[in-house]
Amino acid sequence: MAERWHRRAGHLLRHSLKARLVALFLVLALATSAVFLAGMQQALGIGWRDAARPLLYDYVDRLVVDLGTPPDAAKARALTERLPVTIRIAGPATQWESHPRRHGARDLRDERDAGLLVRRTADGHRVEFGLNLQAWRDKPRLWGWGTLAVLLLVTALAYAYARRLLRPLDDIRAGAQRFGRGEFAQAIPVRRRDELGELAGDVNAMAASIRDMLEAQRALLLAMSHELRSPLTRARLNAELLPEDGDVAPRREALMRDLQAMGHLVTDLLESERLGQGHAALHREPTDLAALVREAALAHGANAQAVETLPEIAVDRMRMRLLLRNLVDNATRHGAGAGPAELRLAADGAGGAVLTVRDRGPGVAPDALPQLAQPFYRPDASRGRATGGVGLGLYLCRLIAQAHGGTLTLRNADPGLEVEIHLPGGSA
């Protein structure tokens, strides 16, 4: 338990600015108290020796005279009952001690003050005086606990104040995480007008600039995609008018494939920007997902033997066809000729569905998996330009899955890459 507490305390001090500030405050408070007490003790000690020694010397002489010669034990007892002092008498006629010391106990009185507190009478008796601390024995303990309680209270107040003082840092961290996810709707609250408040304002200004640049980029892509659709449509119509036989036929087929790929690219750009901005409404309707999977497998030559018949799920059919087309096309392109893409569809046990698409290619480097579904990302090992693709297919699939409330997961299947789409159940 103690070791775990030490580890947590060490981790907190290393990673928490508030904890370090409170610890610094505590160390400064203890150091200041120690220096103050040591200085005051030294100052009072010097004052005692310089000013009170003559008075104490004279007072002790008077006490010895009051005890008589030889010293009277009864008078000494009466004196100890009246004053907080201890008396010890040793001599030929009287042997008496008001507070017998335990065996082996040391006299802790300062040797420099021994001449003040010890007297010898004319008849050979030695009278030794001391201060009786019995009445104040419990007071230091009480003061110690009281001081500790006050110190803990002050520390708790300091921690609360430090937490309140550094609260803008929590807001800035949460805001930076939102901006990193592309959520710019909620700005960082500016709670104060100090340096942290200025920092929050600067981060808000930076986020606004990034949002404007992203909006401009998306607007440009949408405009270009819209403008490209018309010439692509005309080019496709003109290509279809070419003869289907003779020497022109091979070039006509190659041109039709290129135009189809360009059409798919424009469609992917438009859909990814619409879904990325969150403005595209899904047209959900109860759909036989197994039929869509078999349709996509038949159109692209994929293997769809492990497809279960599931209850109808409310999805956007057009976008689900787009998702299936991109997944199968990606698996076919990067399968390295090791066989057709494999499609599996199964229930998840909660009314939803799990769609898995796998190829038998070389797979992807583990460090590239987290970026594989990012826009325009193409790992060199598996996505050279010779194989086609611009890095939008998996990104669009992730957006479609998220728009349906689902998830997309990528993992190496050894061999090949496996893409898993989880779609929750629900009605339209």
Image (cartoon, helix red, strand yellow):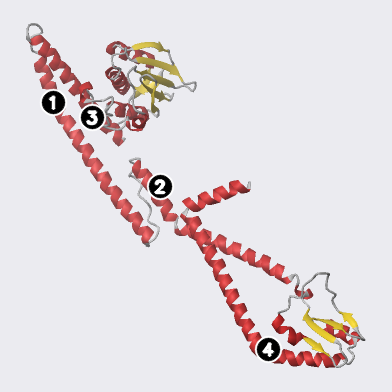
- Closer to the chain start, of discs 3 and 2, is 2
- Give the label, 3 or 4, closer to the camera: 4
Q: Residue at x 46, y 55 (%)?
A: 17
Q: Which mark is residue 52?
A: 4
Q: Are marks 3 and 2 in contact (CB under 8 Å)?
A: no
- Closer to the chain start, of discs 1 and 4, is 4
Give the answer, above or below, for where 413 lies relative to 272.
Answer: above
Amino acid type, residue under disc 3 in the picture: Leu
Where residue 183 appears, as percent x and y from the top left, is 34, 42
Q: Residue at x 78, y 89 (%)?
A: 60
Residue of label 3 = 269
Amino acid type, residue under disc 1 in the picture: Ser
Where residue 52 appears, as percent x and y from the top left, is 68, 89
- Residues packed near mark 4 inside 10 Å, few (<14), some (14 to 19) or many (20 plus): few
Q: Are marks 1 and 4 in contact (CB under 8 Å)?
A: no
Where residue 75 appears, as percent x and y from the top left, is 89, 87
Q: Which quadrant holds residue 384?
A: top left
- Closer to the chain start, of discs 3 and 4, is 4
Q: CA distance from mark 2 to mark 1?
A: 44 Å
- Closer to the chain start, of discs 2 and 4, is 4
Residue of label 2 = 174
Q: CA distance from mark 3 to mark 4?
A: 95 Å
Give the answer, above or below, for where 219 lies relative to 166.
Answer: above
Q: Which quadrant holds residue 106?
A: bottom right
Give the structural element (helix, strand or loop) at label 2.
helix
Residue of label 1 = 230
Give the structural element (helix, strand or loop) at label 1.
helix
- Residues packed near mark 2 inside 10 Å, few (<14), some (14 to 19) or many (20 plus): few
Give the structural element (helix, strand or loop) at label 3.
helix
Residue 288 visible somewhere in the drawing: no
Amino acid type, residue under disc 4 in the picture: Ala
